[in-house]
Image: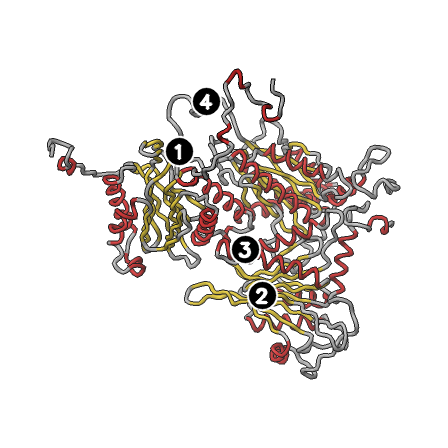
Amino acid sequence: MFRNNYDNDSVTFSPQGRIFQVEYAQEAVKQGSVVVGLVSKTHVVLTAVKRNAEELSSYQKKIVGVDDHLGVALAGLASDARVLSNFMKQQSLASKLSYGRPIPVERVVNMIGDRAQSSTQHYGKRPYGVGLLVGGVDDLGPHLFEFSPSGLTQEMLACAIGARSQMARTYLERHLDKFADCSREELIKHGLLALKESLAQDKELTVDNTSLAVIGVGSKEGKRRVENFKMYDGQEVGPLLEANVETSGTGEGEGDAMETDS
Amino acid sequence: MTSIGTGYDLSNSVFSPDGRNFQVEYAVKAVESGGTCIGIRTKHGVVLACEKIISSKLLKPGCNKRISTVDRSAGIVTSGLLPDGRHLTSRGRDEASSWRQTYKAPIPLSSLASRLGGYVQAYTLYSSVRPFGVTAILGGWDSEAESGVDGQVGNGPAAGAGGKVDDPSVKRGGPALYMIEPSGLYWGYYGAATGKGRQAAKAELEKLDLNSPDCALSLKDAVLEAARIIYVAHEDSKDKEFELELTWISALDGPTKGRHEHVPKELLEEAEKHAKKSLEGDDEDEDDDEMEE
Amino acid sequence: MNHYPQAWGRPRNDVYGPYDHSYTHSAMPKTHTQSPAVTGTSVLGVKFKDGVVIAADNLASYGSLARFTDVKRIRTFAPNTVIGFGGDVSDMQYLDRLLQTLEINENYLSSSEHSLNARNLHTYLSKVMYKRRSDFNPLWNMMLIAGFDEDEKPFLASADLLGTTFSSPTLATGFGAHLAQPLLRRLMPNDEESVKDVTKEQAVDAVRACMKVLFYRDARSMDKYSIAVITKDGVDLKEDEKLENQSWAFADQIRGYGTQVN
């Protein structure tokens, strides 16, 4: 139809009741490289494929630790993700300072959802161009939330966003019933295998382009203990990749073709 | 599509030559494609129900709650663009909180509906914002008790001036149900429905005869009916799976003690079973009719 | 007729006498923050093996006047935290409203398992109290927070108008700190270690005995009181208890009372 008339700003509805600017922002998410998240009864795992702009440049960081019990994986405009994750860090700190307890995951996710929604309803602002997978643990156990530029946040059992993420989602749907009872290692294995599904034909998971994060909850001496956010990056990913993913060689990460952002 | 505005529909707050704000009408379109939501008001309480279409198998069941609480005894469910619904709920909570700070009492539902209606309408006045893409159903119970003031420490003198009015003819409190549209227009209802299956839902609600003074629907019956009506309304989107969410608010002497709560699991399961059975019953009747012919 | 701005809205000087400007140039600092108005007296708290007992009388005094005799100084916060307030009653009401707002907001989370426990409330209140003291406008209260902590163990702590906090198996505010604490401490010869040996009946009896002693000796107390017993199953709050078996027989030995003149 007349898409170009109704897509100039996010304060215009199309005749069908759609907001095109928000839908375009969701396209930015699809341009980013894939990230996968999944949750069991005790752990939540986030995995990501990193991209570099050129052969010699560093790889864009895709997973950010927000607090001991919270982490996010991003796909899309990394700078927008930085703004959101900084806000989450502040809110987590405030909760610890005021109440002495880590912020419930649902609360912090609702906060960023509301911020994102506000940028879709007021002129002069643009929607956030990033999708996030928020993984965290609290009194209810481990959680995984998907955040999208429209401000919609949903709790998931497993999720994948970014380029070619449909392949990962298919893998996750196929194995969905197994996740709840997975051990930490099995969950990591599924996370890496789902990630692998989304890679382009000639690409592989290497220590340079893969990153992984785990947060867990367990009990020690009857007390509920949080297994703090732990990120595996660079060489640390090596053993995990060898154990879980068959690779033809280790170590040499080949940069992807030049792509914008991550 | 005759109503492609021709220029009067590109900006909010603009009147077309026939006096319409097209952006608001387009916002209504967003509501029409959302999951069905209904509210039922009975003498004993209010029930809110929501059809949550499952867009992905990866969603965690039972977790993504759509019906939210405002203060303690009001619930709000929205149909349409869900982030806009959250924005409106947030505003409702702020209004309730600021009312409490000023008047040291919970906000009466009529005032809450008025505030939210005014807020939604304000977003139709300026081109720098867009209208809300949601219709909200607001339900609750205004307390019938002499609740005093927040933070009240004692009960005051037992006799003499400045005491309470214990006159039984003074009736306060009761159920309330309102529906607020993207234009800011709102009415009080006995039964309200919005979203994709609203036509089917409205037809079923009318059959219940809720506005008649002889209506003998108990709160539990209303819960069962609400579930059944959602199932009926879901027939319009039969190909997709959905999750039913039910909440209720009763009088102070009822099951929720005046608070807005999600229906307990046993009752939810009973309602779903009852709903599924009555749908099958309808199918069987149709088959019988056909066989007779 | 004086039309100048300083005379606007004011009664005429020739009719009502010269205007009293002394209120404008008070060299004195504000002193209303330095004393409470309507006050409650002691609050007592004792831990026992399955929970906590807390008690306070129902009196609000206006100086030496026993002004309000049905004041509930023990307030419950869902699901099983209780706060007893001593000190200024209007500040107690302010804190009560603050905590109610907090409770309503916590209720907005989708699950009640997230709720703030007694320790979180204590952290929050102690920060509020400290902030107000640093503003030279204290909330003139000393309160006991009783309930359970995040490990489901009985929790009892105090916070006062200076922002000072204590935690102990037995605590008391006001006069109770001088008169009741020694009696309550008899239950706990080994401090925290003794808590597991104290039964509910022992704790309740000790508290009732102390309330009697306080009525004997605290001139700003009353014989009607409220007592709350907190266990994992919830709060059992009785608000109209009367002191029993009072013995005023010693009164005739006090000089100035009874038959003795010297």
Q: Is residue A198 above or below residue B239?
A: below
Query: Could you tell me the amino acid type at mark 1?
Result: Gly
Q: Position of residue C82 (x, y in %)?
A: 40, 46
Task: Confirm or deny contact between disc 4 and disc 1 (CB under 8 A).
Answer: no
Q: Position of residue A47 (x, y in %)?
A: 64, 69
Task: Tell me the distance, in whole angstroms, between the alpha carbons under discs 4 and 3.
Answer: 49 Å
Same chain, labels 1 and 3: no
Query: Could you tell me the amino acid type at mark 4?
Result: Asp
Please give the residue where the numbered disc 3 appears in the rendered image: A94
Q: Earlier in the sequence, mark 3 or mark 2?
A: 2
Q: Which mark is residue B167?
A: 4
Horizontal relation, residue B243 to residue A127: left or right: left
Task: Tell me the distance, in whole angstroms, between the alpha carbons under discs 1 and 2.
Answer: 50 Å
Which residue does the image show at 73% across and 73% down from the upper left?
A52
Task: Confirm or deny contact between disc 1 and disc 3 (CB under 8 A).
Answer: no
* Tag 2 secondary structure: strand
Which chain hosts label 1? B
Q: Nearer the viewer, mark 4 or mark 3?
A: 3
Same chain, labels 3 and 2: yes
For the residue pair A58 and B266, the one nearer the viewer reads as A58
Same chain, labels 4 and 1: yes
Q: Nearer the viewer, mark 1 or mark 2?
A: 1
Task: Tell me the distance, in whole angstroms, between the alpha carbons under discs 1 and 3.
Answer: 35 Å
Which chain hosts label 2? A
Please give the residue where the numbered disc 2 appears in the rendered image: A44
Please give the residue where the numbered disc 1 appears in the rendered image: B154
